[in-house]
Each structure stands twice: as C-alpha cells, then as structure tokens.
Image (cartoon, helix red, strand yellow):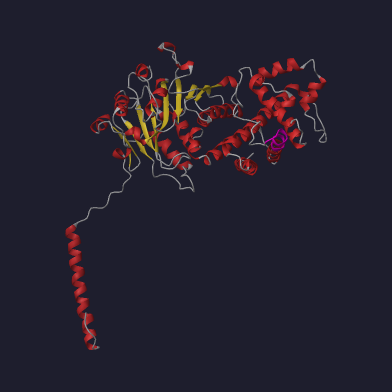
C-alpha cells in the first residue's frame, strides 16, 4: 500500500467515526473505534500466522461460505487444538479463539445477530485474561458496552454496535490492508482525535513531527552525533508515554530489531490502555515492551524503586513530553528522594524539573535524554534556577532547541527541547533557535521535513555559529548570564537595522529643500503669467 493509500485509509476511518458517533462524546467514541481496529489487527495477524502454521491443513472455503476457516479447522481437529495453541503462543505470543476473531464478529454484525454485544464482551475479556502469557488485565476497562451512550436497552446497544462494526468492516474492505497498515491507521486516528480534543490532547499525543526530532536525536551516538545512528539501543524509556507514539517513533528510527526493550509509564488509565494496544498494533511483542500504569512523580513503579545504585535500571535513551507546568504536592520526605536530593525539589507551581530529574536519574552514562519543556524552565528563578545551575555546572545540559509556537493541539505556547547527557564530550551548550522555521497551518503550525532536518543536522554537526539560528555558547558566558538559558540571549532572530548617518541624512534633506524651492519659484512664475495666486 502506498503512502497515499495509507492516508486515504486513515481518512476513510475518520469519516466513518464522524458519521457514527452522532451525539456521543468524541473521546468516548475514540475508545470504541480504536478497540475494534485493535481487535481487527490481532485477528488478521493471528489468522495469517495460523495459515502459515497449518499449511495445507488450513481450510480453503469458497466465496459463498461465510464460515471462518480457522473455526472449520477447530471443528475438524478437536484433539489437536491444544497443541496448536501452544505452538501459536511460541510463535506470535498469543491465541484468539475462532469465535472471537474479527471476521466472526463482523459476520454477526452483518447479520444483525442479537448475540453480537455479548460476544464482543467475551472477546475483550478473553484477550485481557487468556490470549497472552503476560496478562493484559484491564486493557478494555474504559470501553463500556453497557453504556446508555450506545442505547438505553440491550437491543438498542446491540443494534448500534452492529452498525459501528459493519461500517468499520466495510471501510476496511475498500483497501487491500496489510496488518502493518492497521498500525498506521491507528496512529492516524489517534492524531485526528487529538486534534479535536483541545487541552486533553496533551494527555495522550505528541505530534509526529516533534516526536521525530526527539527520536532522531536520542538514536544518534551520544558522545559524537556526527558518527551517526547507534547500531542498537538496549532499552528506551518514556515516563509520561501517553499513547506510546513517541516510543514507537524511536523504534521506527532504530528498526524493529534495534531496541532490546521498550519501557513506558502512564498515569491516565484510558491512555495507558491506548499505549498497550498501540505497541501490539505496531508489531511489538508483549515480551518486548512493558507499560506501567502509575504516577511518575510519586515513583509508583517498583522497577524504579531500587535503592542500590549497582542494581538500578538505566536506559540508553529517554524521551518524554510530560504535562507542562503541572501543579504538584511534594512532601518533605521527597527532599531525600534519590531522584531529587542532589538538586532540590521543583516548586509546587511547576513540576517540570521534577519530571526532568526523574528521567535523568535513570539515564545511562552512554545515553541521551530529550525532553519537551515550557520555556520557563530556561529562566525562572528560585528552586528551578538552583536545579538548572547544578545541571549546567555538572556538564549535563548538552543542547537547547527552541521550537515555533502553536505546534501542539493542547497549547499554543512555544516550547523547547532540552537534551541531557550524563557524560558529554563538549563543555559548551549548543543553542538552536528554530522558532521562525515552520509552515503556518489552519489550526496548528507545521514543521516540514526540511525544518526537522535542519534542526537534527545542526544538532549532529554542532557548528560554532549559524547566524540567527544556532550557536555554541561557553559555560563562562552562561555563568556571566547567571545561568539563564533564555534562547534569545544567545541566538537572536532579530534583524539589525542598518546604522543611520545623520550628517548624510541632513545633507540630503538640505539638497531636497533647495530643489523644492527652485521648483516653487518656477511654478509661481507660471501662475503669475496666468493671473493666478501663487503658492
């Protein structure tokens, strides 16, 4: 499928979503739509693997036969199903009973079967508790099929569900979809739902253009980016992962076998489930990722609570787009938290540095961290100044990248990317002011591929100076500025006005006045000859 067809598939599904949701809240309908797309992916992947595993034994049915080939095989081979499922768990890590496959459910929808809703509920429960070796409990917990938003009675809800599934099935049937393309369609729909969610979008989605910048930066050699991309990342972390799109972008940069394991953390339960589905939809096996539901600031993940530095988990790459200037309630005990005790606590009014220090604590010595932050972290005083000063003095802040305003669905403010390293080669700090490089869109500004390339190549090449765009700044200059990292102090985009020579201007004015006087006398002469009043 071409890129144009991929986009058309996404647009088709988005049109179906708008047609079907009616008066239903967009966020509620998002969960239904994405859950069914997820079920379709799991089913297609499973059936393709089953066909390969069974080979000639896989039933071939004619076009008029609406039965599911795998269901026919189960009926014909009841004594072999247990061994077959064991083999499938070894090969693709999960099993789905034929009656819970998408094609079975789509057929129930097509025939308006009254058992559809019950079957979908059982299908979701089966996937959560039995499909995978590592159970995906609560994966569909936010999808309420008993909600009155679908209908007041079971019959009404079943009818609405039949309509939704049938429309999705018909929409997908227009395209020769491969299972890989369903992941792209899922990502497209997340972006579209984010575009209509306003401030809520910041909870689950980082625009792909910004994700690409962070991903390309953290996958380059940390000591010398000019050497290019690393061959392998042992692991990668996003501690505020939303729907997981940023982690998947890192994986895309490295290739499907380029990362040992993906780790994500997410506080919002709905978004946490989106992230788990998103991983599986993009072909990441359940053994290749771990997403944790919990509060990052409270450090609720047991994996990250190891007190022994020798046993602490560390990451080759850390990426994040945490909530901007979130109010939080740090306790007195947190002052001794191993993440913060060497720096001090971020102020209650803005947890930005609390998030940053959390990720930085778990960054490996040879790793790179790239985090999206509001500009305030660059210059605000008090506790934030003390944290910023120590990070600078310890040589941990590598690069500051200023982005254009209005790139996010959730806010119009300009933001920056802070790149940090535990061990960095260069003593100075690279400032990139990319605030004026974008294309204006209807609702959000857009970074074009050339804008992204300019940012990444500048980070990679680290030039001494590019007029009105980038500059390497010594620590002594930063110290002279009281550790203020306001980008415009070091890289101004203002165009200097040409100096004005007042003597020259005065001489020109004098000459002009003389010319005006000569012209006036000549004009008055003509007026007198005509008998008209002079000027």
> Viewer-proximal residue, 436 or 259?
436
- Region of the chain picked out in magenta, as a range: 152-160
Most foreground residue, 492 or 79: 79
Q: Residue 205: x percent and y percent?
A: 51, 34
Residue 399 in sight here? yes
Pick the quarter of the image with the N terminus: top right
Q: Position of residue 317 (x, y in %)?
A: 45, 24
Quarter the C terminus occupies: bottom left
Q: Is residue 93 visible?
A: no
Nearer to the camera, 517 or 112:
112
Question: What residue is rendered at 54% in x and 27% in y?
Answer: 269
Where in the figure is residue 244, as x and y percent of width and height? 53, 29
Most extreme residue toward the front, as rendered? 152
Q: Is residue 47 left or right of residue 496?
A: right
Among the 4 quarters of the image, the one containing residue 469: top left
Image quadrant assignment for residue 309: top left
- Vertical arrangement, residue 412 with respect to residue 214, above or below: below
Quadrant position of residue 115 = top right
Main secondary structure of the magenta stretch: helix
């Amino acid at each position: 499928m071409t890129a144009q067809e991929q986009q058309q598939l996404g647009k088709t599904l988005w049109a179906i979503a708008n047609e079907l949701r009616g008066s239903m809240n967009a966020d509620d309908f998002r969960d239904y739509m994405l859950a069914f797309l997820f079920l379709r992916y799991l089913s297609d992947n499973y059936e393709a693997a089953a066909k390969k595993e069974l080979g000639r034994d896989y039933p071939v049915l004619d076009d008029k036969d609406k039965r599911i080939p795998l269901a026919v095989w189960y009926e014909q081979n009841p004594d072999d199903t247990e061994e077959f499922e064991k083999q499938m768990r070894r090969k693709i890590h999960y099993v789905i009973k034929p009656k819970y496959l998408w094609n079975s459910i789509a057929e129930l929808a097509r025939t308006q079967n009254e058992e559809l809703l019950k079957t979908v509920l059982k299908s979701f429960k089966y996937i959560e508790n039995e499909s995978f070796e590592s159970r995906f409990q609560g994966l569909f917990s936010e999808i309420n099929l008993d909600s009155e938003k679908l209908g007041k009675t079971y019959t009404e809800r079943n009818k609405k569900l039949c309509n939704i599934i049938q429309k999705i099935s018909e929409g997908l049937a227009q395209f020769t979809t491969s299972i890989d393309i369903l992941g792209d369609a899922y990502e497209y729909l997340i972006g579209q739902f984010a575009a209509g969610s306003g401030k809520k979008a910041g909870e689950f989605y980082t625009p792909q253009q910004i994700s690409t910048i962070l991903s390309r930066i953290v996958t380059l050699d940390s000591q010398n980016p000019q050497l290019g991309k690393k061959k392998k990342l042992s692991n990668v972390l996003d501690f505020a992962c939303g729907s997981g799109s940023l982690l998947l972008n890192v994986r895309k940069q490295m290739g499907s076998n380029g990362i040992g394991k993906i780790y994500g953390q997410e506080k919002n339960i709905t978004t946490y489930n989106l992230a788990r589905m998103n991983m599986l939809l993009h072909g990441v096996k359940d053994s290749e990722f771990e997403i944790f539901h919990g509060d990052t600031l409270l450090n609720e993940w047991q994996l990250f609570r190891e007190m022994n530095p020798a046993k602490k988990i560390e990451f080759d790459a850390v990426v994040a787009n945490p909530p901007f200037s979130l109010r939080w309630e740090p306790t007195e005990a947190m002052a001794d938290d191993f993440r913060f005790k060497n720096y001090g606590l971020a102020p209650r009014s803005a947890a930005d540095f609390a998030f940053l220090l959390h990720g930085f604590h778990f960054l490996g010595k040879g790793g790179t961290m790239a985090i999206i932050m509001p500009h305030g972290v660059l210059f605000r005083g008090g506790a934030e100044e003390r944290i910023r000063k120590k990070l600078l003095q310890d040589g941990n802040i590598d690069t500051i990248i200023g982005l254009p305003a209005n790139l996010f669905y959730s806010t119009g403010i300009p933001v920056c990317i802070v790149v940090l390293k535990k061990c960095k080669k260069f003593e100075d700090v690279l400032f990139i002011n990319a605030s004026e490089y974008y294309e204006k869109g209807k609702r959000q500004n857009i970074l074009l591929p050339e804008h992204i390339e300019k940012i990444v190549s500048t980070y990679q090449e680290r030039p001494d100076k590019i007029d009105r765009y980038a500059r390497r700044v010594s620590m002594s200059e930063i110290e002279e500025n009281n550790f203020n990292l306001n980008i415009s102090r070091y890289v101004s985009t203002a165009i200097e006005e040409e100096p004005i020579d007042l003597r020259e201007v005065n001489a020109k004015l004098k000459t002009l006045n003389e010319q005006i006087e000569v012209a006036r006398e000549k004009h008055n002469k003509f007026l007198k000859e005509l008998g008209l009043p002079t000027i």
